[in-house]
Image (cartoon, rainbow, N blue to C red):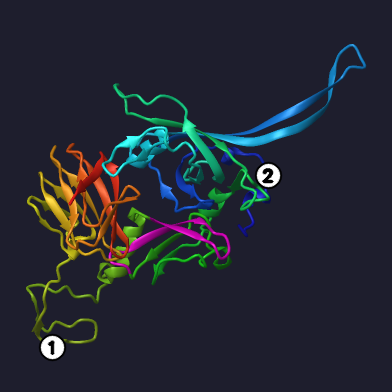
Amino acid sequence: MSITLLSDINYTAGTNDYTISKGYLMIAKWTNGVVGTYYDIGDCKTMTIEPTEKNLEHLNTRYAAKEYDQLVSLQTGCNINFTLDELAVDNLKMFLNATNSDTGILYGNTNDYQVYAIKFIPTNTTGPMTYYEFHKVKLSPAGPLSLIGDEYCSLSFTGQTIADLVNNPLSPFFSAISGLHEIEYLGIIKNNYEGDAAPTADDDEVDDYSVQSRWLDMTATPVKAYLCTDDTEGAASWIETALSTDDLAIISLTRNPLLLQDANDVALSGGTIDGAMIGATTPAAGTFTVLSCGVPVITDSATGNVTPAQMQGQTHVVTGNYTLSLPTAVVGYHAMFMASTAAVFHLGVITGTDVIVLNGDALTAGNKATSDGSIYTQCYVECRITGKYTVMSMKGLFIDGGI
């Protein structure tokens, strides 16, 4: 990052350095030597880092008491440990070193060659923040998964870094960027709340964006939010995130300027404009129509087709054993689907050539994604590529339900 950190200027000890660490993890798979797309792996209960070193010791034996007179470093590296309590399918696959079949079966210990790139994004409000990038990590289970118990299940991981000399020759194992707390506290982090498109790789440190910068694409329907996870010049990385409460407030004020009503504003009532003075103008009499907007929660109580208007960020509550057919896959469609009863529901497609990509695996064109029948099972559906719906399990298991 091309930024001067306050911690580089002032090293005076003080209580501002007392820290209560908080944050979350973003992870990406290495595939054929290339790092894939980062995604949020959910609530992370604990996270530790331990740089490691093995030395060849040499003792001076000239005197009665032997003394070390040389230590040569033979091996360096870094170990990380973290615990997750969201048993999403991708997290379970990572824990079990598994691959999955087209029918939703996880084959344990069949993917032990997979390595990952991991980013730790700090969110603490007490003490300085430090952002970490672990370039190449081999993960393994750090303990058992409890299948019966009275506490929330958790997945414990241990990871060993592998040197990435090709992409990160100066820091092959991991990088740490400090000082983000002071920068954010002073309002130096640049955000864009009036974006007219999604951010690109060129919206980078040269434009004063940095890790944790936020961006709202106000032209998208609904508005989309993005978070910067890498500000490298010409190769910035932005991930789409859920809208925060602050984002919603900004959108509300931007889209509804009448919320900033002053003494000259005149409210319209009764479905007509009756000639009342508005500002310095008296408009002609006429009628107006109340415009409808998207319903945030939709109840699906029968088998049927989901309309394009119902794929604009809504949550669908499915009340029984029904099949919902998604409209022709158009980039930007997205919605959440959740079962309100213990019943199987299916997500199909209206257009038979459309493909559902279920938890990272493409199904046969026209095939449905089918829930496991447990109550509150839910999944997130999104179209980022024309003709393809990505279905990600959020709770419970979804499998290939066939045509």
Disc 1 designates what residue?
284
| 68 horizontally vs 30: left or right | right
Q: Is residue 177 left or right of residue 316?
A: right
What's the amino acid at mark 1? Ala
Residue topped by disc 2: 11
Q: Is residue 223 magenta?
A: yes
Name above or below for residue 108 compared with residue 393.
Answer: above
Q: Position of residue 148 (x, y in %)?
A: 29, 22
Which residue occupies the extreme top position in the image? Answer: 64
Can you name the residue that lies furthest to the right here? 62
Q: Is residue 159 visible?
A: yes
SS at mark 2 in the image = loop
Name the kind of residue labelled 2 in the image. Answer: Tyr
- Image position, residue 254 (x, y; %): 32, 68
Which quadrant, please, contains the N terminus? bottom right
- Image x and y of residue 160, in percent: 56, 35
Q: Residue at x 7, y 73 (%)?
A: 270
> Mark 2 near mark 1, Cβ–Cβ under 8 Å?
no
Query: What segment carries the magenta color?
Result: 220-240
Q: Position of residue 211 (x, y in %)?
A: 52, 55
| Along the line of sight, the residue nearer the viewer: 243 or 288 | 243
Q: Is the residue 57 above or below the residue 123 in the image? A: above
401 left or right of 125 in image: left
- Give the crowd class for mark 2: few <14, some 14-19, many >=20 residues within 10 Å: few
In the rendered structure, the answer to whether residue 50 lies left or right of residue 123 reads right
Q: Residue at x 42, y 32 (%)?
A: 109
Q: Is residue 195 above or below residue 239?
A: below
